[in-house]
Image: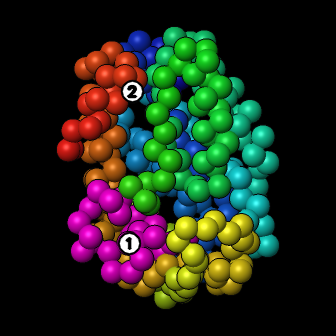
Amino acid sequence: MNGEDVKEAVGKADVAIVPFGSTENHGGHLPFGTDCITPSELSLRIAERCGGAIVLPTQPYGVSPHHASFLMTMSLRPETLKALATDLLLSLLKHGIRNAVIINGHDGNSPALDEAAKEVKGHGMFVATLDAWWVAAGELLPKSTFEVWSGLGHGGEGETSMILHLRPDLVDMRKARGVVPHLPKHLKINWKFEELAGCGSSGAPDKASAEKGYKIAESIVNYVCMFITEARACGWNVTKISDLRRKDW
């Protein structure tokens, strides 16, 4: 978009969609840009479907120290990502966009993005974050959609399905391997990814399909669009949105 395009788009927008990703190994079958491709495409589809939204360029680097042993993992410190996200959101605010929806594509980004959202809230900005689309999909779709581990995993059934749907040209299913780790449910263990899956991917990527990816994408896009519609209806008022979200969407 050039300057005139941006001016026209911002004049019609009341919300910015802000995608965050990472650049890291996703096993032998998926591209390093997996965590960027998914939030980027979801953001564009959300903006197109709900209207009145602009989409920022995807931030390609995330907090990935737990994947650092895999060659060419690019990782930011949490404080770096927090500062970057805060500055981007405050830049939106400076240009008159007071509402933002973050679409996160990587689990390691979550704490930093949460801290950034809290900071800009103090400046009067509204921020909602889709923190983990891979978890949301497992809850939004019928349980029968996924065959193993509710579709979870780094490069697993859900994530591989998404890339098969979005960019099948970048997937090599001949090399799809994964491990389902067995961890305690109520205790969080800090691990390095190679301790869970030396092949670079977890879950069951061999169970993935483009059809499942389509269903995942549609469930996420519809959910976020419904949220934006409800938020607009009540003037982006947090208290009222909280009430509205108790509806069975």
Q: Amino acid at mark 1?
A: Ser
Q: Measuring from the top left, give residue 80's x and y in whole percent.
A: 78, 40
Q: Which residues are magenta?
A: 137-163
Residue under label 2, please give it. Answer: 53
Asked whether the viewer can see residue 144, the reply is yes
Q: Is residue 153 magenta?
A: yes
Residue beneath the point at 26% across and 38% down: 246
Seen in the picture, residue 8 relative to 1 is either above or below; the reply is: above
Q: From this view, report whether residue 28 is shown above or below residue 110.
A: below
Q: Residue at x 29, y 36 (%)?
A: 245
Q: Assess disc 2: are there few (<14), some (14-19) or many (≥20) residues with their C-alpha within 10 Å of its C-alpha.
A: many
Element assignment for label 1 = helix
Q: Is residue 86 above or below residue 63?
A: above
Q: Is residue 28 left or right of residue 173?
A: right
Magenta: main secondary structure equals helix
Element type at marker 2?
strand
Density class for disc 1 (Cα within 10 Å; few <14, some 14-19, many ≥20) is many
| Left or right, residue 204 beside residue 248 | right
x%, y% of residue 212?
A: 30, 69
Q: Position of residue 121 (x, y in %)?
A: 57, 22
Q: Position of residue 45 (x, y in %)?
A: 35, 43
